Image (spheres, coloured by chain):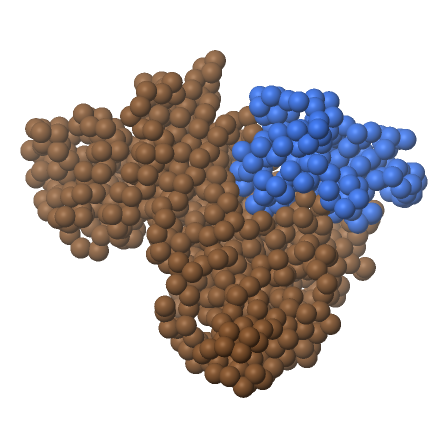
């Protein structure tokens, strides 16, 4: 066990955990931030995607000891009241079915649009293919990313 | 207008634990901050008091209305569509509706089961009745107060109006008075043409919660004092627990207890959904997921081959002993055992005319054999369950498609009565059939009882994927006989699988049965210790694809356009049907083919390689046209055009979403889906080995169309799934010149065609 000072969603938090524990379980079990989902545990599905200094990162393979001073943002901290343009675009296109993967999808999309504000369809497909949606909402995810891109650029 | 006999229970009459004026799930406190009321609740002013009109709805004094969704939600969006039906007959103003998931209560609700695409079909009348009954009671209450005949009162958008006197009031004003009236014995339902909510797209009521990461899934439940548990199961089918060393992990951080247990009692008569792949498991219980996960990896456990294993099945009171075959099976053996069994005479399911003679004398005979592997469901939320068992009560929070089929097993195993088992249906992170088999709820309950603490049972992804309950492996041989004029004169299907056939009497009576003078359907099966379960459109998910692939080849051999070929057969089936019990409506079947032909501009020149397929199952009709382009030798699905006939469409945009999902799911499984075994051991255990379709492999566009009619609604989650396998195979043929007989189609190292 060791003590770690983390900055999560703009708040300084202190946890006393095994240095090897992945951030996914720190968030879910120790900080009760359960919007970040467990899907595979091996960085294959993207359900656990969070931002590390604004960049999409798979929290299931990120040991707490590797976080250091970097700031973590989870779906709960993406916007004050769920009105980030990407979240709004998700609602406009009524994207979710079961909904379980969507927090990870949204976190990937937000990070991607920061690095590429006006992506082509192929660029969206490439950037988002690390996130599995078992319900198959990909066509709507792509449409929502395009809508969000327009909103962010306007 | 339709008159309907009413039968509506009232929550507070039947459920004594519900608080007066509340009817809320009082005992279910853990999710208090995250029960399923919509995010709209945050902006709507909540009433000070609720008045319950029946089990499906309660109205506040300010008019805000809560509608309960009776069926489990796993992404099919019943949380929105079912309340829409109630709201329609209630004449409710949708923006003042709050939706909550109902409690599981067999006395109050008809069929709290998600499966078979039957939710909307079977819920149609009860849901309409609930809304219409409440509206009737509101009118009665207003009539009494206003001293006018109830027949003169009209309703619109949550308002009661008496035009002759000019009196008008909102529902909230009469909610209390209405709640005290006796429900009418029969009610009048609206005409389809008068629908205002049904048929107009409404956003997913849980959308805001989903995109903000709110707590909705049982895996998200955190409770003071709650323990986390995992179970170790045999790594291969055919193995059972021999021994384990609890001391090997007892001193690891966070570990509280390690013990073995049997999920079911020995003499319990299991129902169809009580599939229990591994009867004895080792439970590892600790304080956090990570600690338990690590301990599970370190646990020293020995497994052994079993020579004998059996259990008791109770099929509607008929008890039988079922033996599980021993042995460690491999996929290679499966293929040869299926081929061997397929070569023997099958079990006759249907015979019209004299197929033997016609096949012998035919001008042309086409014979093809198709196969498909086991599939894992792989819902994104791994199997899990939260249970709190006390000496006189079990409270279970579970992602479950079938609470009614597991409560008996839970009560039996815990030594409680059915009344002492409370089940809360949490939103499921997918199901696809997997969560109809709820052994994990019994497991969580057993562990909680042993620990005398609330317990969250969590399966790792690897546990989930290697625990059995797969889609069966299948094989089918089709034969078609053509006469000299290229008419289809005989048709033969012989299908089987491990451990069950995809055919059965139901599917044997589907198209093209009824359209061919000489028809033969037979089946066979090979037993196995690998457990199986319903997987989106069970049996049809194989048959629909391969049959439609075969018909494409027959149409080509006959020199006919594949859509016209099917339409000609349907015309014959309509005008001069062969045999009896034909299980489809030729007009509606032809309707989706004609619609997809029109919407896809079939027949016009197109750069893409196109394939078509249509199928009828789960009471609905679906047809697809798939456009594929080859890019650097890899097939890319450019577009799918889909036509469906499922009667009245409740929530059109959400219905389109469901069809889009089924299409993507089908393409993924057709291209990549496969579970294989070596010496009983599943060879894939996570998404690194088990390939799931991703965005760059999904269709670039999906265009969904619904046949417009006023027929009572039927299922939607499953029917678009089976035919996509066929449409994909037929488009692949156009792109490569090779026919695709073996699923998955894009498996490396397998020669295709």
Residue B54 visible? The answer is: no
Residue drawn at (31%, 23%), measured in percent from left and top? B604
Q: Decide: is A30 above or below B551.
A: below
**Picture quarter containing residue B176?**
bottom right
Q: In which quarter of the image is the C terminus of chain B?
A: top left
Q: Can you give x and y, in whole percent of width and height, for residue B407 in the image?
A: 56, 66
Q: Which of B607 and B174 is in front in this view?
A: B174
Residue drawn at (41%, 72%), measured in percent from left and top? B188
Q: Can you give x and y, in whole percent of width and height, for residue B513 in the image?
A: 21, 46
Residue drawn at (42%, 20%), measured in percent from left and top? B629
**Picture quarter containing residue B70?**
bottom right
Decide if residue A120 is on the left or right side of residue B742: right
Query: Residue farthest to the top?
Result: B632
Chain A as rendered: colour: blue
Decide if residue A46 is on the left or right side of residue B611: right
Q: Which chain is brown?
A: B
Q: Nearer the viewer, residue B102 or B285?
A: B102
């Amino acid at each position: 066990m060791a003590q770690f000072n983390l900055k999560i969603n703009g708040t300084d938090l202190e946890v006393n955990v095994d240095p090897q524990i992945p951030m996914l379980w720190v968030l879910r079990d120790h900080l009760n931030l359960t919007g970040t989902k467990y899907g595979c545990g091996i960085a294959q599905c993207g359900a656990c995607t969070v931002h590390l200094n604004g960049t999409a990162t798979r929290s299931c393979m990120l040991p707490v000891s590797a976080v250091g001073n970097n700031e973590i943002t989870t779906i709960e901290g993406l916007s004050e009241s769920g009105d980030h343009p990407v979240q709004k675009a998700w609602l406009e296109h009524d994207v979710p079915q079961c909904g379980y993967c969507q927090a990870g999808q949204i976190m990937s999309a937000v990070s991607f649009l920061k690095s590429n504000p006006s992506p082509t369809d192929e660029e969206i497909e490439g950037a988002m293919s690390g996130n599995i949606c078992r319900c198959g909402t990909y066509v709507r995810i792509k449409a929502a990313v395009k809508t969000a891109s327009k909103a962010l650029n306007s | 207008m339709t008159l309907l006999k009413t039968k509506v229970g009232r929550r507070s009459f039947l459920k004594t634990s519900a608080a007066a004026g509340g009817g809320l799930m009082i005992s279910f406190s853990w999710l208090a901050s995250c029960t399923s009321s919509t995010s709209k609740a945050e902006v709507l002013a909540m009433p000070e008091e609720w008045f319950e009109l029946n089990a499906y709805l309660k109205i506040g004094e300010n008019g805000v209305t809560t509608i309960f969704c009776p069926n489990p939600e796993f992404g099919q969006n019943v949380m929105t569509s079912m309340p829409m039906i109630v709201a329609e007959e209630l004449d409710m103003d949708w923006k003042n509706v709050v939706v909550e998931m109902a409690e599981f209560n067999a006395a109050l609700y008809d069929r709290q089961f998600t499966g078979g695409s039957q939710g909307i079909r079977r819920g149609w009348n009860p849901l309409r009745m609930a809304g219409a009954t409440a509206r009737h009671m509101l009118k009665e209450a207003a009539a009494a107060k206003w001293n006018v005949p109830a027949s003169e009162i009209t309703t619109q958008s949550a308002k009661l109006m008496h035009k002759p006197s000019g009196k008008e009031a909102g529902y909230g004003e009469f909610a209390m008075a209405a709640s005290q009236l006796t429900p009418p014995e029969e009610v009048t339902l609206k005409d389809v043409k008068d629908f205002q909510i049904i048929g107009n797209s409404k956003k997913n009521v849980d959308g805001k919660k989903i995109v903000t990461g709110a707590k909705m899934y049982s895996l998200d439940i955190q409770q003071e004092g709650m323990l986390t548990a995992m179970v170790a199961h045999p790594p291969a089918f055919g193995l059972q627990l021999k021994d384990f060393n609890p001391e090997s992990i007892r001193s690891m951080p966070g570990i509280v207890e390690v013990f073995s247990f049997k999920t079911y009692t020995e003499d319990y008569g299991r129902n169809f959904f009580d599939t229990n792949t591994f009867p004895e498991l080792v439970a590892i219980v600790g304080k956090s997921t990570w600690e338990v996960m690590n301990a599970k990896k370190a646990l020293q456990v020995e497994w052994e081959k079993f020579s004998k294993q059996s259990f008791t099945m109770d099929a509607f009171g008929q008890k039988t002993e079922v033996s599980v075959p021993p042995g460690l099976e491999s996929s290679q053996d499966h293929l040869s055992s299926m081929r061997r069994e397929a070569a023997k005479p099958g079990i006759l399911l249907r015979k019209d005319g004299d197929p033997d003679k016609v096949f012998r004398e035919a001008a042309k005979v086409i014979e093809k054999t198709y196969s498909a592997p086991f599939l894992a469901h792989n819902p994104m939320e791994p199997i899990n369950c939260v249970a709190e068992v006390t000496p006189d009560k079990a409270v279970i929070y579970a992602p479950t498609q079938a609470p009614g089929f597991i409560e008996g097993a839970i009560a039996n195993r815990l030594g409680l009565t059915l009344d002492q088992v409370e089940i809360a249906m949490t939103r499921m992170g997918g199901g696809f059939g997997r969560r109809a088999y709820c052994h994990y709820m019994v497991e969580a309950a057993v562990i909680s009882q042993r620990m005398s603490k609330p317990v969250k049972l969590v399966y790792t992804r690897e546990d989930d994927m290697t625990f059995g309950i797969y889609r069966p492996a299948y094989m089918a041989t089709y034969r078609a006989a053509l006469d000299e004029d290229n008419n289809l004169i005989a048709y033969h299907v012989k299908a089987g699988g491990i451990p069950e056939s995809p055919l059965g009497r139901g599917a044997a009576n589907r198209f093209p049965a009824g359209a061919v003078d000489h028809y033969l359907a037979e089946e066979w099966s090979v037993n196995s210790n690998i457990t199986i379960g319903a997987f989106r459109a069970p049996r049809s998910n194989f048959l629909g694809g391969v049959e439609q692939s075969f018909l494409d080849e027959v149409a080509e051999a006959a020199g006919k356009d594949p859509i016209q070929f099917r339409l000609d057969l349907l015309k014959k089936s309509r005008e001069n049907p062969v045999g009896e019990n034909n299980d489809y409506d030729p007009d509606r079947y032809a309707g989706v083919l004609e619609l997809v032909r029109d919407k896809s501009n079939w027949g016009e020149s197109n750069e893409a390689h196109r394939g078509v397929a249509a199928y009828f199952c789960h009471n609905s009709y679906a047809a697809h046209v798939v456009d594929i382009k080859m890019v650097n030798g890899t097939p890319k699905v450019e577009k799918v055009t889909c036509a469906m006939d499922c009667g009245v469409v409740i929530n059109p945009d959400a219905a389109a979403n469901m069809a889009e999902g089924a299409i993507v799911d089908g393409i993924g499984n057709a291209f990549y889906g496969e579970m294989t075994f070596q010496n009983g051991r599943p060879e894939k255990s996570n998404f690194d080995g088990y390939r799931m379709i991703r965005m760059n492999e999904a269709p670039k566009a999906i265009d969904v169309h619904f046949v417009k009619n006023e027929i009572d609604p039927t299922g939607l989650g499953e029917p678009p799934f089976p035919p996509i396998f066929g449409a994909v195979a037929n488009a692949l043929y156009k792109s490569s010149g090779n026919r695709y007989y073996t699923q998955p189609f894009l498996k490396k190292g397998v020669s295709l065609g």
